[in-house]
């Protein structure tokens, strides 16, 4: 055989090897004998990986206090009489099949769905009664249960709620209280919440739980609404935003909620058409603890608090924390989401626009001299929770610089929510950045202003040193839910919010946009910015 013939055969062999190797790497469906197609994704084996910024605090829904934990425990694992589906516009029936309301608005008769717990026990009205009474003993849930006079089971499928007074925001109560298996919670006792369990009715069961690393879920094959499409879910703790972006780019994450906005352009490039950026139904606000003993109770001085608020540049915070994609905030809830939310455009309450000169004049009115202002006046520590590189932490850095420009000094403290939030709820702080989200009724403000909301509010208004008439404040809360008339409720809430703003204790900072990116293998269904439902997800074949 001559050399040319040998070389030709060698080239043909190399081309054949290349073609065969390429065929071995294809991800397209292939034909099997009988003409059936093998899907690119095997739904029984594929694992949906989702980022979590910090470890899960507990497997007990009552012990989950931040949105990232609630996204799991309140939606994927546990269920309630109502659900929140932001993609569908708000509250919808879930475990409540039917709800009948008496003419006087004091009695709600709830007929339950034919559902069962993950442990196989049927859902009974007695489980609902147990869950509500358990929540009513937890001070954290006073803000959504204090109006309930009694809750009783009349038969296995019927629960009757009797209220002390008409309460137009009952939808949020029916969403907030999750239903647990009385038998399993009782049997586990104090261990409940520290280990995986099957005490919920939701579409996903916790199979592995590790406080440090993350958790795994599997589909509830006996779920009352039908078997979920996604069979396996794994939450991976990645506290650093840059690391989360790299993980998504390397196909280590299929779904990235609350995507870091500082890397949004990179994520859009990596996700192609599989991304969404919307204004969230949320609020990031700064709170000042007027009872703080720091520097001779300097924060107890209204003029000092006003100086702090006038010193803050919300546009700079938006640029740093939300990469400019957010919106400066003036009200507690975005009025375009909530009809009863006061809007700053109506001029019904005081706002604090960025004005450093006015901030300095407020300090002089508070009794400080030019020399003291030039030297720097200590106002304590600004505290928040989350990763050191996350948006709230970035907001603290801007505020620290803003305050320095007008002669105020503060330290920054950022740690995980499990460390920080107990301090905030106990008013063991000077200043903080806090967040709230996912509600469709302005009565949600109750958790920040009412004395019965111990364990939820960060500013304690019911105090002899209160900067406002807290009894009137709480009266307005009650009046706001005593009627279903939107205009009347708006009037009450505008007066309430005006009182809070006059006290210079809570300052809305920005509404954070919600960025979501997902893998091309995944169809997330109707997107919900805050409380996503994995049950609506499916793999793309």
Image: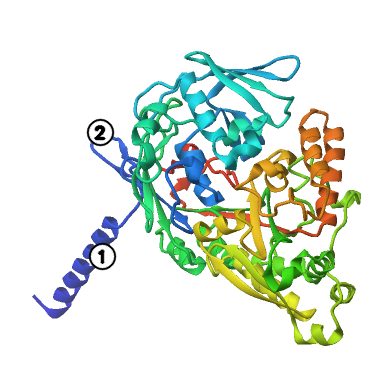
Q: Which residue is mark 2?
A: 34
User: Which residue sits furthest left?
Assistant: 1
The answer to whether residue 496 of the structure is visible from this angle is: yes
Q: Which residue is mark 1?
A: 18
Left or right of residue 190, residue 159 in this image: right
**Residue placed at 86% from the left, 34% from the top?**
487
Image coords of residue 498 (percent x, y): 85, 50
Neighbours of disc 1 within 10 Å: few (<14), some (14-19), many (20+): few
**Residue placed at 52% from the left, 19% from the top?**
112
Neighbours of disc 2 within 10 Å: few (<14), some (14-19), many (20+): few
Image coords of residue 384 (percent x, y): 60, 63
User: Which residue sits furthest front?
Assistant: 464
- Viewer-proximal residue among 404 and 279: 404
- Viewer-proximal residue among 142 and 341: 142
Position of the N terminus by quadrant: bottom left
Image coords of residue 392 (percent x, y): 62, 64
- Viewer-proximal residue among 303 and 242: 303
**Which secondary structure, mark 1?**
helix
CA distance for labels 2 and 1: 28 Å
Q: Quadrant of residue 228?
A: top left
Q: Of label 2 and label 1, which has the lower sequence position?
A: 1
User: Which residue sits furthest top?
Assistant: 155
Q: Quadrant of residue 406?
A: bottom right
Image coords of residue 521 (percent x, y): 43, 49
Q: Quadrant of residue 421?
A: bottom right
126 versus 319 height, above or below: above
**Which secondary structure, mark 2?**
loop
**Residue placed at 32% from the left, 40% from the top?**
44
- Viewer-proximal residue among 133 and 491: 133
The answer to whether residue 537 of the structure is visible from this angle is: no
């Amino acid at each position: 055989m001559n050399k040319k013939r040998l070389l030709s055969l060698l080239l043909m062999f190399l081309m054949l090897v290349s073609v065969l190797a390429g065929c071995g790497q294809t991800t397209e469906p292939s034909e099997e004998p009988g003409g059936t197609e093998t899907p690119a994704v095997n739904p029984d084996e594929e694992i949906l990986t989702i980022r979590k910024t910090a470890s899960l605090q507990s497997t007990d829904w009552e012990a989950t206090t931040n949105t990232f934990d609630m996204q799991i425990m309140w939606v994927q694992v546990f269920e309630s009489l109502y659900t929140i589906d932001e993609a569908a516009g708000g509250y919808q029936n879930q475990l409540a099949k039917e709800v009948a309301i008496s003419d006087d608005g004091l009695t709600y008769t709830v007929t339950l769905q034919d559902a069962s717990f993950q442990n196989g026990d049927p859902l009974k009205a007695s489980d609902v009664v147990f869950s509500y009474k358990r929540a009513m003993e937890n001070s954290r849930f006073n803000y959504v249960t204090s109006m309930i006079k009694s809750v009783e089971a009349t038969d296995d499928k019927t629960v009757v709620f009797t209220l002390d007074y008409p309460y137009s925001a009952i939808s949020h109560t029916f969403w907030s209280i999750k239903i647990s298996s009385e038998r399993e919670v009782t049997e586990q006792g104090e261990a409940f919440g520290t280990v995986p369990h099957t005490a919920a009715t939701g579409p996903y069961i916790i199979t592995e739980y590790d406080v440090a690393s993350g958790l795994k879920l599997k589909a509830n094959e006996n779920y009352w609404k039908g078997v979920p499409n996604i069979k396996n879910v794994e939450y991976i703790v990645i506290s650093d935003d840059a690391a989360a972006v790299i993980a998504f780019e390397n196909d280590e994450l299929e779904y990235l909620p609350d995507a870091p906005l500082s890397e949004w352009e990179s994520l859009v490039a990596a996700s192609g058409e599989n991304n969404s950026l919307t204004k969230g139904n949320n609020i990031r606000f700064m709170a000042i603890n007027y009872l703080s003993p720091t520097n001779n109770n300097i924060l107890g001085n209204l003029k000092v608090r006003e100086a702090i608020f006038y010193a803050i540049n919300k546009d700079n915070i938006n640029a740093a924390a939300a990469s400019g994609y957010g919106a400066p905030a003036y009200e507690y809830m975005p009025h375009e989401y909530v009809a009863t939310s006061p809007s700053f455009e109506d001029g019904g309450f005081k706002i604090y626009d960025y004005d450093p000169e006015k901030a300095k004049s407020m300090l002089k009115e508070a009794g400080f001299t030019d020399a003291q202002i030039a030297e720097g006046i200590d106002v304590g520590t600004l505290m928040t929770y989350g990763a050191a590189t996350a948006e709230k932490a970035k907001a603290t850095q801007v505020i620290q610089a803003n305050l320095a420009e007008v002669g105020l000094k503060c330290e920054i403290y950022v740690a995980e929510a499990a460390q920080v939030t107990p301090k905030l709820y106990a008013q063991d702080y000077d200043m903080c950045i806090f967040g709230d989200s996912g509600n469709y009724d302005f009565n949600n403000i109750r958790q920040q202003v009412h004395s019965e909301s111990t364990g939820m509010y960060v500013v304690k208004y019911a105090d002899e040193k209160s900067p406002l008439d807290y009894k009137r404040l709480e009266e307005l809360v009650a009046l706001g839910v005593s009627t279903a008339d939107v205009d009347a409720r708006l009037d009450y809430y505008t007066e309430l919010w005006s009182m809070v703003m006059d006290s210079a204790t809570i300052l809305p900072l920005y509404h954070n946009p919600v960025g979501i990116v997902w893998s091309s293998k995944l169809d997330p269904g109707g997107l919900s910015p805050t409380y996503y439902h994995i049950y609506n997800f499916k793999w793309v074949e």
